[in-house]
Each structure stands twice: as structure tokens, then as C-alpha cells.
Image (cartoon, coloured by chain):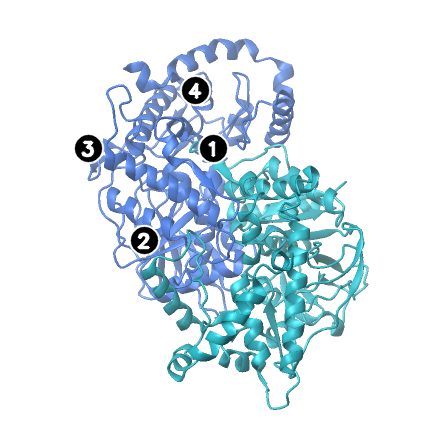
Chain colours: A blue, B cyan
Amino acid sequence: MARDNGDGLAAIAGRIGVLGSVALNIVALAIYLRGRAAAEKQASKKVKKAAAVAPSSGKPPVACDSVINLDHGDPTMFEPFWRGPIGESATLVIPGWQTMSYFSDVGNLCWFLEPSFEREVRRLHRLVGNAAVEGYHVLVGTGSSQLFQAALYALAPPTADTPLSVVSTTPFYSMYPPLTDFLSSGLYRWAGDANTFDGDDYIEVVCSPSNPDGSIREAVLKSKSGKDIHDLAYYWPQYTPITQMLAHDIMLFTVSKCTGHAGTRIGWALVKDKEVAQKMSKFMEQSTIGVSKDAQLRAAKVLGAVTDGYEHQLATAAGGDANLLFHYARRKMAHRWCALRAAVAASGIFSLPNEVAGFCTFTKDTVTSNPAFAWLRCEKQEVEDLESFLRENKIITRSGTKFGADQKVVRISMVDTDEAFGIFVNRLAAIK
Amino acid sequence: MARDNGDGLAAIAGRIGVLGSVALNIVALAIYLRGRAAAEKQASKKVKKAAAVAPSSGKPPVACDSVINLDHGDPTMFEPFWRGPIGESATLVIPGWQTMSYFSDVGNLCWFLEPSFEREVRRLHRLVGNAAVEGYHVLVGTGSSQLFQAALYALAPPTADTPLSVVSTTPFYSMYPPLTDFLSSGLYRWAGDANTFDGDDYIEVVCSPSNPDGSIREAVLKSKSGKDIHDLAYYWPQYTPITQMLAHDIMLFTVSKCTGHAGTRIGWALVKDKEVAQKMSKFMEQSTIGVSKDAQLRAAKVLGAVTDGYEHQLATAAGGDANLLFHYARRKMAHRWCALRAAVAASGIFSLPNEVAGFCTFTKDTVTSNPAFAWLRCEKQEVEDLESFLRENKIITRSGTKFGADQKVVRISMVDTDEAFGIFVNRLAAIK
């Protein structure tokens, strides 16, 4: 049972620890310090030669002396689940003649929304109970990044003299500022920390649970003319107890963090107001003439398989939670957090946010939250720039400075492969 | 043979003609004149009730008294080809566990580009000979619309005081102005007709063959500091003779107009300069964190099937060109243009651009061009607004005013279904 639960993580980590210290030599170190991009390129070339990259997985497998890249929240942790018994029911087959038209449903205000995708989105929310769907419009986007921009576009007045301020509580998701500003739009502009913002007109982005630090957030600004966008990418049972059915005006979700299918690039929005939904839909129409049907059909298959897994309760004695995505993923996440806290304790120079628990209305038990990212702080005075310090230890993370915080803290993905995570915690534990 | 070639179009058109005049009554007309959106919604509702919409086709089937919507270049004309013998080889199967990572190839400057898609893009261009691929970077986008914006982003200086002017020869593609301006970017701004532009710094968009009028275009501005984007969406043998292998700095293509898979939302760019390619890739990274892998795999399958069709020369006595996409589509397009010119002659109040012929290096024969759109002008003095006039006749088109031209001309899609096209030409012929 312990082996089942741990997915061989401890075994891998142990093995790696021995090999890792042997393999670490000056030559290798010099190569790796050339920086992430160069190192990755080299690794990729090596792998290409060996033809070891799985079709469309893209990332080279890691070895004990590899640079471990935990910069992105690349949710490859979920892959073993989808290779399991439920995987077959999620297989997508598209005949050559299908999905040719631009249109999915000419009667829908979001005319490029595949009806099967909308159906599965509503079904999943009804199952989990994390967000209201009755009376909401469902919109689809090329990932939730596109929906975030669509929401800015829909909420900002089209003819204002000055761009509308976009704010979020620090630490905020590092992509919000560039997503807002990369085209120097005259409609909206990034204005930083919501806590220090002064004014009545704004868009406040509320990411809860928070990327990067996992905390539960609410809007901090309360002006009547202000608008909110709720980014709920991580409001799923594997990351946090579902404590209430949220019913905000604009709620964003993504398949990426729910089921792990980041490469499919499908997000969705639940939007209360019809006019806002129409404007957001218009954004996707102008920006990309809608959203890939094939990707939507894929997402519909995957979300449908998740709900089916629960509705059919296919779990067997041998399989345990092999058909129950959220239970499977929560167990894995809890194990990883356990391993990480042990590594942090072993090292002695780091700290993590405190563990938070709550009653989950979906699983009907009291559980701790297991955020998708670790917000790791270094308590050692000599270490001023934690991202660089960890890079010297061949661990790639994202500096706190990108989240509006300081450089003694970093964000680390907790959803990478077992192998990468195992090497990472082992390496972290050894840093003194 | 005649029946094979005509795909039953003449038969359908004939049948429709009789029924159409019977069905046309005041009540129906009043309903349809409520406008496109309302009419489409109604049709869609009707169809939903009858459950007649094919999975993910989205548009209701047309009947003899339907409003015929030829506003968009929705390339559903190609569907019968993909239902034919080649279709099976283009079927895409994706297991539940695949395409999960954000990354497709970490060693590529376009890290989200699926290697199989790049391979098939290069293979197809080598087959057709329409564009150089040696020494070019291949980039993928969510349709060529996203790549167009990526090119603007890459070519415009990031810190200029005033936005860079974006121009194109009139009549220009109606989406260029909104694609350039919808976010009020400080980086670039639509500046209209290239022929009347005065200045040295600009981006000139050259669409050839031209959407909307099918003409072959070259850049008209020649400043050393000016930049060009070549939109070659229609530079394929079914639309125009391939007269040379183009080798411009930035060349945009889309699966939509090449194979008819618009719903897949995949375009690609061939880019000579590495730095420009990097910036364009960065745009896709920021805008949508890459491009759906599932959609890329679909596009790779479809493009691969096209090239395979030619390389294997599977054509049989019965099938004719059933495995040869460009031959099949050229034959259909030629038939349609023939039918349209006959309808225009029968009506007597319209005119079309002159037919143009050339030697095609791909098919090794002299052929006329068969543009994807008809640029139809009304010669009747009383008709001032041709779009409205045709809408009264239940034909939805796009007004010349959206292309920088006058309102006595409209753009009409030539790539819709046989049924819609048949009803359209018949209806047009009857307008006096």
C-alpha cells in the first residue's frame, strides 16, 4: 500500500541521492551553469539523437545529474493517471472530414463553442460543486490566458482617455503584468499591487487559490465602479478543499490545471452578464477567429472521462483511486507536499507557507491544501537571490521578483513528473 | 464523367430553382429580413430540434428557401474530399495521456511547435513548390490571424513614440484593420491603403492572391526601412497557378484555405530572420502560451495525407482525382467559377474581375485562376448598397466598404458547400 501510494517516489529519490553526488563534477557544473536555455537545448539534442522523446511530450527525460526545470507549472504529474484504466475512454478519434467549418453553433453567442465541450464543463462543475453554472454563459478560450485578455477587453471602456488600471494582490501571478502590457494597449494597463492601489476605476484580478503562494484570496478593493476577474485555475479538489460554490461575475478555469492537459490549450470562462460574455467572445473572434475545435473535442473527452469516472464509480480493489482523478491527484499532491516539507526540514535553510486545512464539500472530509506551487523562502542571510542560488544547484525556479515579491523567495512547480520531483526534493534536502 | 465532375451541382441547382420560386413568399421574406443573426439563430434552433447538425459542423443544412450565408470564407467545400478514400488516412487518434506538456520541442526557438507538424509543412511546400523552406524557420499559430499579429509585434519597435503604420493595397482583407487596432496598441496602427501612404517607416501587408479580389499582388512601397508581411493563404494550386517559388522574409499560410480545415485553427509562418522568428514565437507564448498540440497533430495528419496522396499516386480509374487534393479542389473551383460567370451573364446587372491564366509549375499546365472569393460588382445604377440589395435576396455577403472599397461591390465566398453554392448561383442568375 505504501508503495502504491508513493508511486515509487521515495525509492527513486533514494537512488538518485547516491548517484547524484557521484555524478556531480566540475565539468558538468560548468556546462549547466551556462544557463537554462543552453542546457535545455543540449539535453534536447542529446535526446533527439537517442529518439527518446515520446510523441509530442517535448521534454527530455531527467537523469540524476540533470538540471531540473520547475519554472513552469507543466502538469505532467497527471500523465500516469491517464495511462491508467480511464485513459482508454478518453481517447479522441477525429475523422478527416470533421471539424472543418469555423462554426460550432451559430445560435450561441459564443459561435465557436463546441456543444459537447460546454456540456462537459457544466457536468463537471455540477459534480465538483466548485462554481455555479446555472444562469452563466460558458465561453471557451485558447487556454485561460486568452480568456484573461478577453475579460480585460470586455471590461475596459473602449473609448476612455486613459487605460484602465489592472491590479492584483502581491504576490500575483507573474504572467498578469506581461499579458496586460505586452501590446501597450490603450484600453488597460498593469498597475501592480491591489493593496496599494488608490482609485475607483480598476480591474482587480483575484487568483484563488493563489498562484504563486496557494493562499485563498478575495477581492481587496470594493469600489462600485471597479470590476473583478476571478482566476480559479486551481480551485479543484486536488489542490484545496472545496469549501463553497463560487458565483462571481467572471470565473476563469483551465483544463491544464484541472486534468493536466496543458498542451491542449483549452480554458473556459463562466460569465454572468450577457454583454460581457458577448464582448469576450468578440475578443476570441478577433484575436484567433475562435478556438480550435479539435482541442475542444479533446478537452470534452477528457473532462467527460473525469465525470464518468466518478459517476460510474469504477474503482476496484486493485485500482483504488485509478478512475477518480481528484482523489488520485490529491493523494499524489499530499505525498509530494509531505516529501517537500521533509526536505525543507532536512536542509534547515528554507521555509514554506503554513499548512492550511478545511472541510471539502466534494470529498466530504477535512483535508489540507496542496498547492500546485511551492512558495519557497530562503532564511539564510548570505543568499540574496534565491533563484540564482537554486540554479547553481541545478534547480530552475521562478524568482519572487516576477510576482511582485522579493528575490529571497521563489515559485516552484509541484506538478512535474515523479522523476523530476524526486530529484528536486533530494537535491533540496542536501542544500545547507 | 460530366456527373462526376459536376458533383451533382447542376442537378441541385436546377431542382432548387423550381422549388425556390414556389417557396418564396411574403411571410418567409419578412422573417429572413430580420437580419443575418436572427435568421441564423432561428435556423440553428430548428436544426437542433431535428438533431440534424453533424457533430461539430455547426452550420445548419440549407434548403431552397434558406438565407445563404457567404460572408465568411468557410471552406466546407472540401468536406466531400475528406469523406473520400483519403479520409481514413487522415483520421487522428490521440490517447488520453498524450500531448499533456506545454512543451513540444524545448530545443526549438518555437518550443511549442510539434515536430510532426513542422515536418509536414516542409514536405508539402517541397511538393507544391509555392514557397521556399530551406533556411526558413517554421512557426505555428492559432490560425494565420495570430501569426499576422505576431508579425506586427515582431516588426514594430517596442519603444517608439508613435505606433508604426500598417498598410495594404485597397481592396485589402477586411480583418487587417480590426486585427491591427482592436486593442489600441501603442506599437502599431492601421493606416489604410498602401498606395496613398506617405512615409518611410511602415509594415506593408501583401495578400497574394488577394483576399478579396483574387489579384496577384506585390509590395507597392519600397522604402529601405519599411517591412513586408506576405499573406499567402491562397497561394495554392486550386486557387491560382503556382508561377514561382516565393521567398519573402515573412510568409503566412493557413490550413484553413489549403485543406479546408478552418475549425482546426492552425496557421504557419515561414520566417527568414531568426530574431524576427523569436519575437513572433514570443508573441504566441505571451498571447496563448503556445498553440494547441492536438490541433497541430490534426493539421500534421491532414497535410501529411495530402502529400501522401500525391506521392503514392493512388488515383484509380473510378476515383479520378479522389486522392489528389489540389486537382480535386481545382476542378471544383473551376466548375464553380464557370457556373458563377454563367449566372452573372444571365442576370445582366453584375460584373466580375477578368479571368486570368498562367502556367502552373505544380500541375505543369496553363490554367485560369479560381479565386476563393468572388469580388462582385453591381452595374445597375439604382443599386447603391450591394450588400443590402443581395441580403434582400437572402444572400449574405460582405460589403466592399469593409475592404476599403465602395458599397457597389461585395465579397462572396466561393468555398461553401455544394448545396449553398448551387442555391446562390441560381438565385443570382434570377436577379434582374
Q: Nearer the viewer, mark 3 or mark 2?
A: 3
Q: Which residue is mark 3?
A: A366
Q: Amino acid at mark 1?
A: Gln
Give the CA distance from mark 3 to mark 1.
Answer: 33 Å
Image vertical order of residue B102 relative to residue B43, above or below: above
Q: Between tags 3 and 1, which lies in front?
A: 1
- The amino acid marked with disc number 3 is Thr
Q: Amino acid at mark 4?
A: Gly
The residue tagged 2 is A220
Report which quarter residue B415 is drawn in. bottom right
Which residue in the structure is indicated by mark 4?
Answer: A422
| Distance of label 4 from label 3 (alpha carbons) | 27 Å
Q: Is residue A11 above or below residue B257?
A: above
Residue B98 image label: 1
Q: Chain of mark 3?
A: A
For disc 2, the chain is A
Camera-side residue of A150 and A109: A109
> Pointers 1 and 4 in contact (CB under 8 A)?
no
Q: Are marks 2 and 1 in contact (CB under 8 Å)?
A: no
